[in-house]
Amino acid sequence: MARSRNPEKKMKLSGHLREFRNRLFKSAFAIVGGGIIGWITFDQVFSALQQPIIDLARDEHVNATINFNSVVSAFDLHLQIAFFVGLFISSPVWLYQVLAFITPALKKRERRYTIGFLFLSSPVFLAGAWFGWWLFPEFIRSLLSFTPPGAANVINAAEYVLFAVRVLLVFGLAFVLPIILVFLNALGVISGKTILKGWRPAIFIIAVIGAIATPVSDPMSMFLLMVPLTVLYFVAAAVALANDKRRAARQKNELVTDLLTDEVTE
């Protein structure tokens, strides 16, 4: 009976608010659960983060150390790392909740593309973050090389952790950008030819991203980021072109089918 009174299955504003609240609670519980894991693994995470400083001080005799400048700074850092780890671990959950809240307004094919984007972007983001982590010791080495002789590097722990998180996030998001292009093409927002024709401004944008993501004077680090991003961009263009070709063939078949149906009807 309820379905007959609401054939289009439209939800009232109060229903949308309840659904938003429920999905927000689920996301929050997932982040809290991941944060507990981050709290437990704080020592391992912080040890990995400060390892480049330790290696630099040992191998090149650089006077560098991570400093806690107040009584509560160690506790604050513990909370920050727990939150970042929780946010990272629970990302599949809260990303799914965001998409699940949006997708009912999309068509069936668009929902399929959205879910595919979620599952594809996660490993690509992890690959980008890993690549940033691989280059992170070189960033630290290059930045600390500007220290004048006889001076010491007393590094604030909270600022150092935020710097590391920013580098990993920028690298991860940079790797996801080509996936976003494919996603927009699948939704029909942008064509493969448009992506391919825009390779010149794309290379410029990639260079800007490389300059932002690699906060060092070493151009090799910037080049190492630009190469995979450029390859991913042209891979995205190729996938979009293939998708356009497949879409055009499907539309042609549908048009022929409609014409044949009309002839039979007449």
Image (spheres, rainbow, N blue to C red):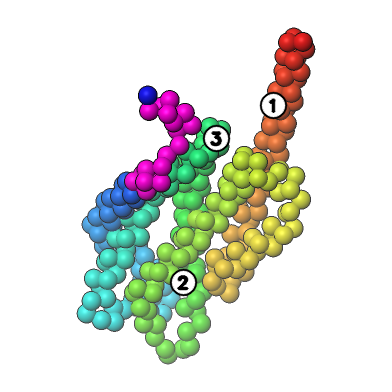
| Alpha carbon separation for disc pair 2 and 1 | 52 Å
| Alpha carbon separation for disc pair 3 and 2 | 47 Å
Residue 250, numbered circle: 1
Front one among 58 and 23: 23
Quadrant in the picture for residue 83: bottom left
Mark 2 packing: few (<14 Cα in 10 Å), some, or many (20+)? some
Give x and y (percent) for residue 233: 65, 50
> Considering the image in quadrants, where does the C terminus appear?
top right
Residue 15 falls inside the magenta stretch? yes
Q: Furthest-bottom residue in view?
A: 150
Q: Mark 3 and mark 1 in contact (Cβ < 8 Å)?
A: no
Give x and y (percent) for residue 155: 37, 79
Does residue 120 show up?
no
> Considering the image in quadrants, where does the N terminus appear?
top left
Pointer 2 or 1: first along the chain? 2
Q: Relative to residue 84, is residue 59 depicted above or below?
A: below
Residue at 54% over, 51% down:
176
| Alpha carbon separation for disc pair 1 and 3 | 17 Å
Quadrant in the picture for residue 32: bottom left
Classify residue 192 as left or right of residue 123: right
Q: Amino acid at mark 2?
A: Ile
Q: Which residues are magenta?
A: 2-20
Circle nearer the viewer, 1 or 3: 3
Q: Which residue is mark 3?
A: 107
Residue at 41% over, 46% down:
13
Pointer 3 or 2: first along the chain? 3
Q: Relative to residue 61, is residue 35 depicted above or below?
A: above
Q: Main secondary structure of the magenta part?
A: helix
Q: Which residue is mark 2?
A: 140
Give x and y (percent) for residue 240: 67, 41
Circle nearer the viewer, 3 or 2: 3
Pointer 1 or 3: first along the chain? 3
